[in-house]
Image (cartoon, rainbow, N blue to C red):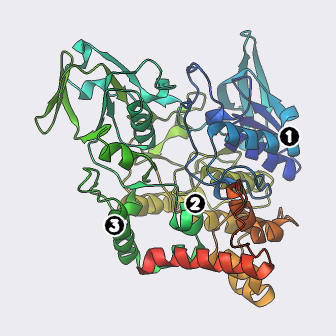
Amino acid sequence: MVQRVAVIGAGPSGLTSIKGCLDEGLEPTCFESSDDIGGLWRFKEKPELGRANIYKSVIINSSKEMMSFSDFPPPADLPNNMHHSEVLLYLRLYAQTFNLLPHIRFQTTVISVRQKTNFKVTGQWEVETESREGQRETRDFDAVMVCTGHFTQPHLPLRDFPGIESFQGKYFHSWEYCSAEGLEGKRVVVIGIGNSGGDIAVDVSRVAEKVYLSTRSGAWVVGRVGPGGLPLDVVGSSRMDALIRKLFPSWANTMLEKKLNQALDHKLYGLKPKHGFFAQIPVVNDDLPARIISGRVAVKPNVREFCGSSVVFVDGSTIDKVDVVVFATGYNYSFPFLPSALQAKCGYRLQLYKHVFPPALTSPTLAVVGFIHSFGAINPLAEMQARWATRVFKGLTALPTEENMMKEIEKDTAAMYQKFACSERNPLQVDYIPYLDSLSEEVGVRPNIPWLFFKDPTLALQVFLGPCTPYQYRLTGPGKWAGARQAILTQWDRVFQPFKTRVVTEPKPDVTHSSKLSIIIRCLILAAENYFQ
């Protein structure tokens, strides 16, 4: 019987895995190599090898209601799109509220995870760790949850850039970037137009002489601010939206791209990619268009070669006297502490059933949590993975046979590669709501929309037409939370609250329930117009 669970990593995925264990009556021990929680969201003045790193200016792309854990709504006063320090504050509040910290062993690195010799009988693992002082220890666990993320190993493809070895300026990976300090008056080339590349180009452009943003394939660019000034992901992420995309995928994609180009002509700005909008996670950046139109950032094609202090692009154009090159070229993913047999791939992705369980294990006692990409926030995805994994550990939910899991992985991989633009750097992507619904079905917590319309129409309207917030997965079933209904009905209040820093008294606002309801209806109409304009 599974009881003792090793959780590797105390970032968001690790924290929610600890809580998932506690909710199921398990005994988690979390190993965190640093001295604090937070993972990616713990800002460090100097990057630390083997750990994720962020820069001073990072603002989370997902709004607070969409990135929250399902039974822990964010404080109303926090901004909708939080600075990294506020994300860390939320994680601290979460850890304190559910008493997670006593289960974490800080400054303890996992060296290896090995099956015990009697694994076929017990399903147990030997976990070897090393303290900061170098002391090693091996302990037995009934199950393991791997929550180490995938932003720790920078990918620096220097061999793809002839002449870089003799480049007269300075170059480094975006993982090393902290702030624009020291780049004042410099000519800077940023290679790569993912979210980090876009952020860094904008950040540096405020002090540099000029920034050149080099992209091989282009990208769709969206802002955090949506219709009516509300968070974009709040007004465009309902179950109704997902249903429209499922029924009319081509039309939905065409209409959205048309609307995006009305606000920002991607072809004119040199940003237009070959892939459709939903094929790859877009660049979320409110400031990039303004930096381009003001000439502070110039979009360029891929780099062909370096010549001294010059950068030559594939279109033949050249930028001379370049001082600094930042490679925003993504990350490699690896789990060096796991047996190689558990790191088998299916295409670019790891061979994991529903991106969680290795199918070849005779006992399903190891789960990977949080190794996932989607248009939505990772916290709710990781939380649902953890809730499912812990119930599988306890034997409350069964997995299919190895053969059936392999067939499902192959089928899922083929469908994923047909729908999304996957690569070594972007090995997997899932549809946010369908993936959550798929796992919630396994856990037994998927909301029953028809039944809700019959039993509680007010709640049902919010669940179907409003943003698909994580609280929906606490309305019923295992882990049901008594506050879920209220969290859903008050989510718009928490969205509006941060804007109330200056009270507009003329005309005097009506604060009655009907007034709030009319505001919510207007927001839903705005969301619908995204598809029908």
- Asked whether the residues under the numbered discs 2 and 1 touch, taking CB atoms below 8 Å apart as contact, a structural biologist would say no
Disc 3 residue crowd, few under 14, some 14–19, many 20+, Cα 10 Å: few
Residue 36 in picture, x, y percent from top left: 74, 27
Residue 111 picture location, percent across and down: 65, 22
Amino acid at pointer 2: Pro
Of residue 329 and residue 372, the one placed in the foreground of this image is 329
5, above or below 474, in the image? above
Q: Give the label, 2 or 1, closer to the camera.
A: 2
Q: Quadrant of the C terminus?
A: bottom left
Tag 1, which secondary structure?
helix
Residue occupied by mark 3: 262
| Dot 1 amino acid type | Gln
- Tell how many labels: 3
Label 2 CA crowd tier, 10 Å (few <14, some 14–19, many 20+): many
Q: Earlier in the sequence, mark 2 or mark 1?
A: 1
- Residue 369 visible in the current orientation: yes
The residue at the point 89 percent across, 49 percent down is 25
Q: Quadrant of residue 115?
A: top right
Write the residue at 55% across / 62% down: 229
Name the residue beneath numbered marker 1.
96
Question: What is the CA distance from the residue labelled 2 to the residue labelled 1?
Answer: 28 Å
Q: Is residue 323 left or right of residue 49?
A: left
Q: In the image, residue 402 lies at what x, y percent?
A: 58, 56
Query: Quick one: which residue is furthest to the top in this view?
Result: 133
Residue 152 coordinates in the image, percent (x, y): 53, 30
Q: Residue at x 79, y 54 (%)?
A: 72
Q: Which mark is residue 508?
A: none
Q: Amino acid at mark 3?
A: Gln
Left/right placement of residue 352 relative to residue 86 reads: left
Helix, strand, or loop for circle 3?
helix
Residue bearing the label numbered 2: 231
Q: Quick one: 312 or 375, which is closer to the camera?
A: 312
